[in-house]
Amino acid sequence: MAAPGSNGEWMVVGPRRGMPRRGIREKPMVRAKALEERESWTPIDSENDPEGVLKLTCKVELLMKKMESSLFYHALMKQIEDPEVFGCFIRVLGSSSQMQMVVYGIGSIESYEPPRLQLSLALLMKRKFSWIGDIEVFDPILSKMECEVLESLGCRILSINEQGRRNVLKPTLFFMPHCEADLYNNLLQANWSADSLKRIALFGNSFHTYKLASELNGSIVQSAKHVLAAAEFADEFKVEIVSDDFLRAFHDSSWHFFGSVLESKLPSIFS
């Protein structure tokens, strides 16, 4: 989690167990404005490294092969194709033939294996399911080389830091494993209507776990009000981790769907 600094800005707490923090920080006072305003973004580095791009691309492709043959991957595909879960995807699609995938907070795919595994899963899902469309990716820590690798693998890098606040106008799968609670909260806040929520499928940290943690940690209540409210009505399906090789990348992950809520039952949330 992040902690407020003495100047009122959000400071990112140091990585845990060698992993980068997932999330997009801004001053609390500008959060309301961020619903209308978006910040242009480009990688802070400009170094060309063709050899590095090739090596990292190969590394991701090898991990994709490893994942595709794993028990974890086969269990996850079986879960997606289960009638109950697949029915939720069908409801998100509605009359559309595809849903876009948006990957927020992927982390450094150059420095850490868990982000590479997460990316591998996203790419394999697009390859397997014809109803998954284009993949858009954003994380403010991505380097120019990482962006080039992602583009070579068929992804589009967002040039705008959306702060997670994308207003969903079409069926969209948000792929957000191990992001910060406030990033999920931003997404839900920007789409807090039954009409928008029904277009969202979300792969990320378990909302049920956030609900349990909020009983012990009051700071979660303040930073994740929409997450905690959504936990009451979301259809959540926990992802089974059947191999320790994928524990760090996907522990406590779940599928979340929100189409069952009616506008009249959507709780009002006040800051």
Image: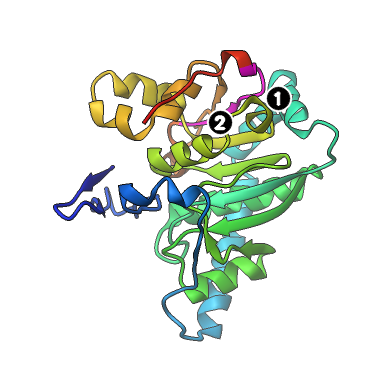
Mark nearest the camera among 2 and 1 is: 2
- Dot 2 or dot 1: first in sequence order is 1
Magenta part of the chain: 253-263
Q: Residue at x 47, y 59 (%)?
A: 139
Give neighbour class at mark 2: few <14, some 14-19, many 20+ (Cα, 10 Å).
Answer: some
Vertical position of residue 110 compared to residue 32: above or below: below
The Cα–Cα distance between marks 2 and 1, rounded to whole angstroms, is 19 Å
In front: 93, or 73? 93
- Rendering coords of residue 160 (x, y %): 54, 63
The reply to whether residue 59 is in sight is yes
Amino acid type at mark 1: Cys
Residue assigned mark 2: 192
What mark, if any, has residue 106 been given in the picture? none
> What is the total number of numbered labels drawn onto the structure image?
2
In front: 74, or 211? 211
Side of 195 relative to 186 (left or right): right
Q: Residue at x 83, y 38 (%)?
A: 96
Residue assigned mark 1: 88
- Rendering coords of residue 103 (x, y %): 57, 51
Q: Is residue 260 magenta?
A: yes
